[in-house]
Amino acid sequence: MNYCETKTKEKLEYSQLLDEFILGCKTERKIGMEYERIPMIKVTNQVAPYGGDCGICEFLREIAKIDNWDYILDDINIIGLKKFHDTITLEPGCQIELSLEPQKYIRDLKKRIEEIDAILNPVLDKFGIKLINKGVSPTTTYKNIKLLPKRRYALMANYLWGILSDVMMRETAGIQVGIDFASEEDAMKKFRVANLMMPFSTAMYANSRYRGGVDTGYKSFRALAWLNTDNERCGFATKFHDGMSFKDYVNILLDTPMIFINREGHTLNLNGRLTFKQFMEKGYEGFNAEIDDWNLHANLYFPEVRLRNFIEIRNHDCVGGGLEYSIPALYKGIMYNPAALEEVDNLLCKYSFNEINELRYNVARLAINAKLRKNPISAICKELVEIAYYSLKNQCEDEEKFLEPIAELLKKNKVPADI
């Protein structure tokens, strides 16, 4: 099939959009984790570039050669590596992301990260690079970080209209967690509770106080950057009301402006000229909407909690020192125990959407000292960790230990940015 022939495909049906989420229902209860870190040159403490003899591209070539990883390419450019179900990919500012095959046990996620790091670290040393666990590059601002040569990133950088969108793309690093769901009802309950939890989780893991060598006055400048990236596709996906369905999420995506589509190796820049609903109804320059367009569009939508064929919980600064494993532990303890999930729902459902939404802005600056109804949220954060801790302890899998680092910090009324 050539490029022109793709124009003749049949129109996409609404039921196909729903199927992408319905088919995500599964009986498994695994945890997925995406772990981004910022590569810095040891000598200069500046972000490592993509190009050059000791750049990130050559680093990926070396890893592929010594450990038999396959290249992930964009045109002729190496933008990542793949081995079985694990990937090492690059974010727009060369942040290095590990995306791991979901596991039943957090200890297996930890083991796999340690195995990959054991391969990466000698090569990083050879290249004079270190990976740092911060939510924002503490020394290098986006003006001195070249955009990765990946076609979609150039289009995103041109489209995203928030005043800190360049910061988000090139300077930030985070940790994301994936949660399975068994049914539509289960998915929407977890989706709603995860949204309610999000400002508290962002506060607990705030770890981006310094940027460009100065104290920003924010505990999580990364959270601030996301708040100022693109309000049409960031923030909360919905008002996460009771009775929400897959259709509600689909309809929100349908009304979101499109950035681009791909056709046979070509990229067509839509630049927000139409929503996906308009694309389905009318097409664009003779092209009809296809399921791959829908999946791409859904992947270019960046809410704090994103619905896919799993639930992706997104807004945590990158942390290290054992804290990184407390993030999946927090959600495993709450999301996979109906009693714990209900307890958290009862704890947080008393707060309105507007209160939770406003809290997002306050935790960026104050973290757990932000106030909700005149009280610091630190007590709620401690309670969330305690609920998850006893849930994991009752599962008798010895995974409550992963929550101990964040519990100890909270006892001292601190977050990673305070250390």
Image (cartoon, helix red, strand yellow):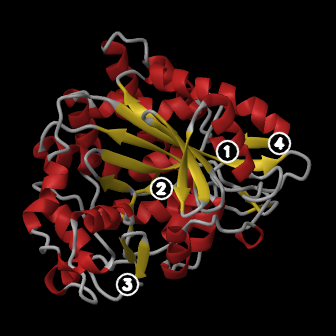
Would you call the spot at circle 3 few (<14 residues within 10 Å), some (14-19), or many (20 or more)?
Answer: some
Q: Earlier in the sequence, mark 4 or mark 2?
A: 4
Q: Residue at x 54, y 81 (%)?
A: 158
Spatial CA distance of label 4 from label 2 is 45 Å
Residue 371 is marked as 2
Q: Which residue is mark 3?
A: 272
Task: Using the rendered view, name the quadrant where residue 298 is placed.
Answer: bottom left
What amino acid type should be assigned to the residue bearing mark 1?
Leu
Spatial CA distance of label 4 from label 3 is 40 Å
Spatial CA distance of label 2 from label 1 is 44 Å
Quarter of the figure that contains the C terminus: top right
Q: Spot the residue most to the front.
A: 1
Task: Using the rendered view, name the quadrant where residue 147 is placed.
Answer: bottom right
Q: Earlier in the sequence, mark 2 or mark 3?
A: 3
Q: Is residue 219 left or right of residue 55?
A: left
Residue 60 is marked as 1
